[in-house]
Structure formats: structure tokens, C-alpha cells
């Protein structure tokens, strides 16, 4: 019974630890993604980049505020119709990340791009060395999270979570050590009682009878 209860406690503690760890990882990754995009840098995770769109030039395909997944792709594999993320050479947004659709490829290998919502093509062509990758989909969870949390709030939340997790871990550790101490004391007491009973039984089997102190006094 005691072993079953102890096993259940271990499973419960392990579950709590995993839940805290997952929450911390998600919070820190989200903060990293948001901060990277604030610095005009794609957040790279597991070989893919996550970029936040800041305009509606690609609507209705991609909306302003969407977080999109970008996969690194060889420029020779790109074709008209693909949506790519690149560092723009346009004077108005020079050096900024931009995500537009390829409308055609020139003989020199550069790409002519255009936003789906724009009436005109982009004034500057895109060269392969400025391409981050090809658009593969949206990360809807991040848009939902960003709707009520800023990067600063997420950093603060991450710090609070880490501190809380540390405190919880310390409390659990202290409780565990205390429980082990109580269990050890109980085991020692049980062992002493068992030894006394064995000794009594041994003396009884040998025919030993304790002297009656009252009779001796008489």
C-alpha cells in the first residue's frame, strides 16, 4: 500500500515537473520569436524561420500580424507563384524583411515580386542572396498569443515562471526529504520493536522467566 502511494506521488511530481518545463519552454520560445522579429530578424527554429508580417500587402493570403513559417529553399527550385521572404532593396523599406509572391523570373536569375493586394510589381528585383526562404504556412498559435501579450510581458512572464518553478521545486524537495526522514525514523522504530520482540521470544523459548521484584521484596 505504501509503495503504491509512493509510486503515485512520484508520477504526480513528474507530471507537474513536465508541465512546468513545457510552459517555460513555450514562453521562452515565444518571447525569442517576438524579439527576433522586433529586431527585423527571422527566428530560426529546427531549421525553419518564423517571420511576422507587418503589412497587408499579401492579403487575403497572409494578413498583417500573421506569423508565418519560412523554409530555406534553393533559389533554383523557386518558380512563379511561390511566396518568398526576402530582404528588400526597395528604398522605402530597404533592408527590411518582406514577403511577396514571385510573378516572374528574369534571365539573370533574379525574381520579380508583387504583393497580392498591390496593383503594381515591386520596384526592385530580388536576388538569391537576399532570400530567406519559401513560405510554407502560418503559425496561428503565435498570432493568438500576440493578440494579448507583448514581448516584454512574455519575458516578464518567463522570469516569473522560472522563479515560481524553482520555488515549487525547492518546496517539493524539502517535503520529499522530510517524508524520507519520517519514513526512516518509522523504519528504525519498527526495527527496534521487532528486535525486542525477537529477543523476548528467544528468551521465552529458552525457558527464561523474569524475576518477580515484588516477591523478592517480601
Image: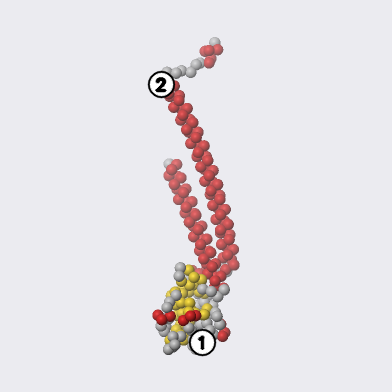
Residue shown at 53% from the left, 49% from the top: 172
Instruction: Please tell me which residue lies in front, 1 or 105.
Output: 105
Check disc 1: other Cα within 10 Å, few if <14, some if 14-19, many if 20+: some
- Tell me the element at label 2: helix
Let me know if residue 10 appears in the view.
yes
Residue 58 screen position, x and y as percent: 49, 81
Check disc 2: other Cα within 10 Å, few if <14, some if 14-19, many if 20+: few
Residue 54 screen position, x and y as percent: 54, 77
- Image quarter (top left, top right, bottom left or bottom right) of the N terminus: top left
Q: CA distance from mark 2 to mark 1?
A: 105 Å
Q: Residue furthest top?
A: 218
Residue 164 screen position, x and y as percent: 57, 56
Rendered view: 189 above or below 24: above
| Residue at the spot of label 1 | 124
Give the numbered dot on residue 205.
2
Residue shown at 42% from the left, 89% from the top: 107
Amino acid at each position: 500500500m505504501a509503495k503504491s502511494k509512493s509510486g503515485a506521488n512520484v508520477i504526480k511530481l513528474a507530471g507537474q515537473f513536465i508541465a512546468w518545463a513545457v510552459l517555460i519552454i513555450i514562453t521562452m520560445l515565444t518571447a525569442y520569436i517576438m524579439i527576433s522579429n522586433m529586431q527585423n530578424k527571422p527566428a530560426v527554429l529546427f531549421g525553419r524561420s518564423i517571420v511576422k508580417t507587418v503589412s497587408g500587402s499579401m492579403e487575403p493570403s497572409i494578413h498583417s500580424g500573421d506569423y508565418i513559417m519560412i523554409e530555406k529553399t534553393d533559389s533554383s527550385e523557386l518558380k512563379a507563384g511561390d511566396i518568398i521572404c526576402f530582404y528588400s532593396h526597395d528604398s522605402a523599406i530597404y533592408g527590411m524583411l518582406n514577403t511577396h509572391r514571385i510573378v516572374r523570373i528574369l534571365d539573370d536569375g533574379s525574381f520579380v515580386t508583387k504583393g497580392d493586394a498591390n496593383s503594381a510589381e515591386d520596384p526592385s528585383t530580388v536576388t538569391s542572396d537576399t532570400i530567406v526562404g519559401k513560405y510554407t504556412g502560418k503559425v496561428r498559435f503565435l498570432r493568438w498569443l500576440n493578440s494579448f501579450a507583448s514581448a516584454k510581458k512574455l519575458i516578464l512572464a518567463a522570469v516569473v515562471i522560472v522563479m515560481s518553478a524553482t520555488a515549487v521545486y525547492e518546496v517539493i524537495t524539502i517535503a520529499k526529504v522530510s517524508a524520507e526522514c519520517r519514513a526512516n525514523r518509522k523504519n528504525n522504530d519498527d526495527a527496534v520493536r521487532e528486535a525486542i520482540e525477537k529477543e523476548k521470544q528467544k528468551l521465552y523459548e529458552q525457558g527464561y522467566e523474569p524475576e518477580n521484584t515484588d516477591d523478592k521484596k517480601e
